[in-house]
Image (cartoon, rainbow, N blue to C red):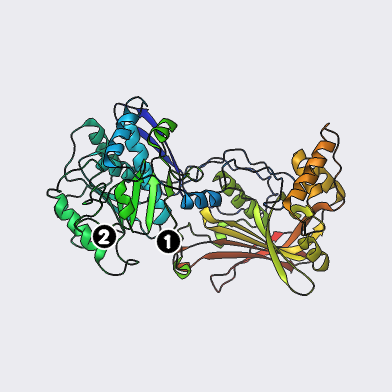
């Protein structure tokens, strides 16, 4: 999911700076004639990508690359992030009790927020609009739902829609805004000015096509909020009817999805769609807390946004709200709808990867991509799938962490009594796979594996945190134990034994492996499944070994020689 950080600069007007940091996809300089020496693993100099080539948020800590990987997820490994497991958060949110607000309580909470609790209208509007944009990104992928029409009403709900339009623009979407009854207040005119500065088009109602699905991929209904009373007047009555027709026509998978902000327009805030004349949205983004009408919502996607409710409000109104996952500004309410696995697909958008753009030496090309993954802030870019095969030809795979790479190969550390170690003792051939999803990239490496020297294992073992050293001693990988409590008890005993800070000896059954490559494959996702794949293979030339490059997408083979 793409994330954004917003900073309120001025309470009197919505002067807001929004930083969106999506995907970094580099361009490649032409390779030099000679293969340079392998550089150390460190982030490359900062770059300035174009407006639609964006960086994810930077990592919270510097990523150091030491001499070689313990298994990803091994017990007692110091976590790289302090946030709770997203899977745990999602499960907690799905089963959490949720309070639904009456119209009166919703209005009272707004007064409390903007009174004694110190919030301003523009702050709440900014957070609400960001939450709506974040929820859209959660469900409607940029590659398939680029064109967004936001229909804004004259009140705060319309302001939320204007803010959402700005964030969606920075997330890479192409928003258009229909804002037929503009509010003259400085807050709203400021939002309009911000969108105009981004060249976001404002469409008059009469210029909207009769068939919205021909020009847009999503419609956001930001016409009326919980404070609206009475019957919608022109032109909103006609707009609601047009959206109502959209919501009941044809296959729900193929029709234009509708996202309603807080209250589906045409609904009663407490009783829902009383006379059947309201919009039937596919997504509802409730703000602060769901309103009573949300109980009548039966669309597939209900999200809660507005991660700003302070404890005094929770206590006073007895609010029960689902926990927000990680740093997200939105959280799904209830269970996610069942998914047709066969329909899950991405249409990748990446710069072209050709033979004349990569480096002659595959180790240098790997360093380039790895450094870009680090710079982009990807979580654990050194995580890799290690596949081994035993003497019976049975393969097995698991995730481990790369801890070093140089011209001699890729190094990780593990227990020499584990299944992977047993496989490698019978068959030294193995494969590694790095998958950097946010960058549409993967790297495959094949080769033979040997243990690293005792000195190398000792050096790395004693560079680890003491807790990880103790964990390596306690954890007998691939063995069966009676329960986790036994593992934890053994760890506590060792912790007590070495509580004086004395030297912790490396166990004989723990150490490193090095895979020496004989094949590299660099893969980059492209549109319509026409992906780029470049393979480096070794050949004997003039009495020496050289790397040559083959494009796996074309018949021709381009050879670039680089001495091994």
Q: Quadrant of the C terminus?
A: bottom right
Mark 1 against mark 2, which lies toward the viewer? Answer: 1
Res. 192 image quadrant: top left
- Give me the C-alpha separation between circle 1 and circle 2: 27 Å
Q: With 235 as the anchor, is 170 left or right in this view?
A: right
Q: Secondary structure at mark 2?
A: loop
Task: Give x and y (percent) for residue 465.
Answer: 74, 39
Task: Give x and y (percent) for residue 490.
Answer: 80, 46
The residue at the point 72 percent across, 59 percent down is 563
Say few, some or many: other residues with alpha carbon within 10 Å of mark 2 (under 14 / 14 to 19 / 20 or more): few
Label 1–label 2 contact, CB within 8 A:
no
Q: Nearer the viewer, residue 556 or 64?
A: 64
Q: Secondary structure at mark 1?
A: loop
Q: Earlier in the sequence, mark 1 or mark 2?
A: 2
Residue 529's tag is none
Say few, some or many: other residues with alpha carbon within 10 Å of mark 1 (under 14 / 14 to 19 / 20 or more): few
Q: With 201 as the anchor, is 55 left or right in this view?
A: right
The residue at the point 76 percent across, 54 percent down is 408
Q: Nearer the viewer, residue 307 or 348?
A: 307
Residue wearing tag 1: 337
Is residue 26 at all visible to an observer of this figure?
no
Task: Give x and y (percent) for residue 169.
Answer: 35, 47
Residue 215's tag is 2
Res. 199 image quadrant: top left
Residue 280 vertical placement versus 68 (above, below): below
Q: With 22 as the anchor, is 152 left or right in this view?
A: left
Is residue 241 at all visible to an observer of this figure?
yes
The residue at the point 15 percent across, 45 percent down is 230
Q: With 130 as the anchor, is 462 left or right in this view?
A: right
Task: Give x and y (percent) for residue 62.
Answer: 62, 38
């Amino acid at each position: 999911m793409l994330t954004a950080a917003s900073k309120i600069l001025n309470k009197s007007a919505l002067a807001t700076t929004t930083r969106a940091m999506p995907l970094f996809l580099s361009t490649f300089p032409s390779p030099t004639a000679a293969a340079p020496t392998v550089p150390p693993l460190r982030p490359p100099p900062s770059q300035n990508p174009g407006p639609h080539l964006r960086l994810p948020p930077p990592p919270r800590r510097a990523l150091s690359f030491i001499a070689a990987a313990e298994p990803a997820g091994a017990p007692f490994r110091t976590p790289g992030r302090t946030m709770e497991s997203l899977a745990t958060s999602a499960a907690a949110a799905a089963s959490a009790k949720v309070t639904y607000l009456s119209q009166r309580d919703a209005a009272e909470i707004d007064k409390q927020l903007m009174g004694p609790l110190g919030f301003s209208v523009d702050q709440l509007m900014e957070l609400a609009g960001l939450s709506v944009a974040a929820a859209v990104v959660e469900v409607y992928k940029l590659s398939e739902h680029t064109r967004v029409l936001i229909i804004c009403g004259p009140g705060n709900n319309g302001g939320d829609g204007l803010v959402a339009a700005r964030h969606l623009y920075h997330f890479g979407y192409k928003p258009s805004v229909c804002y037929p009854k503009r509010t003259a207040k400085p807050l709203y005119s400021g939002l309009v000015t911000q969108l105009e500065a981004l060249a976001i088009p404002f469409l008059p109602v009469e210029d909207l096509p009769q068939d919205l699905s021909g020009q847009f991929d999503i419609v956001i209904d930001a016409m009326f909020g919980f404070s609206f009373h009475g019957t919608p007047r022109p032109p909103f009555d006609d707009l609601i009817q047009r959206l109502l027709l959209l919501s009941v026509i044809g296959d729900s998978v193929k029709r234009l999805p509708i996202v309603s902000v807080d209250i589906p327009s045409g609904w009663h805030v407490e009783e829902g769609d009383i006379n059947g004349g309201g919009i039937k949205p596919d997504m509802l983004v409730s703000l602060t807390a769901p309103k009573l009408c949300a109980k009548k919502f039966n669309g597939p996607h209900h999200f809660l946004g507005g991660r700003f409710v302070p404890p005094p409000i929770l206590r006073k109104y007895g609010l029960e709200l689902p926990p927000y996952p990680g740093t997200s500004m939105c959280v799904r309410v209830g269970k996610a709808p069942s998914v047709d696995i066969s329909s899950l697909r991405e249409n990748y958008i990446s710069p072209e990867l050709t033979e004349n753009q990569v480096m002659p030496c595959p180790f240098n090309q790997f360093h380039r991509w790895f450094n870009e993954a680090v710079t982009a802030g990807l979580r654990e870019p050194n995580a890799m799938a290690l596949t081994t095969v035993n003497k019976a030809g049975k393969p097995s795979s698991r995730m481990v962490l790369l801890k070093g790479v140089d011209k001699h190969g890729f190094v990780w550390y593990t227990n020499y009594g584990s299944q992977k170690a047993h496989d490698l003792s019978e068959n030294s051939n193995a494969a590694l796979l790095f998958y950097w999803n946010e960058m549409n990239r993967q790297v495959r490496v094949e080769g033979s594996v040997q243990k690293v020297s005792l000195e190398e294992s000792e050096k790395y073992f004693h560079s680890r945190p003491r807790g990880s050293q103790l964990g390596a001693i306690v954890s007998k990988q691939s063995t069966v134990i009676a329960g986790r409590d036994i593992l934890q008890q053994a760890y506590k005993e060792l912790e007590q034994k070495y509580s004086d800070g004395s030297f912790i000896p490396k166990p004989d059954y723990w150490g490193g492996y090095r895979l020496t490559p004989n094949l590299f494959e660099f893969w980059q996702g492209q549109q319509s499944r026409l992906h780029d794949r470049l393979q480096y293979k070794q050949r004997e030339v003039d009495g020496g070994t050289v790397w040559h490059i083959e494009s796996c997408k074309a018949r021709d083979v381009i050879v670039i020689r680089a001495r091994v």
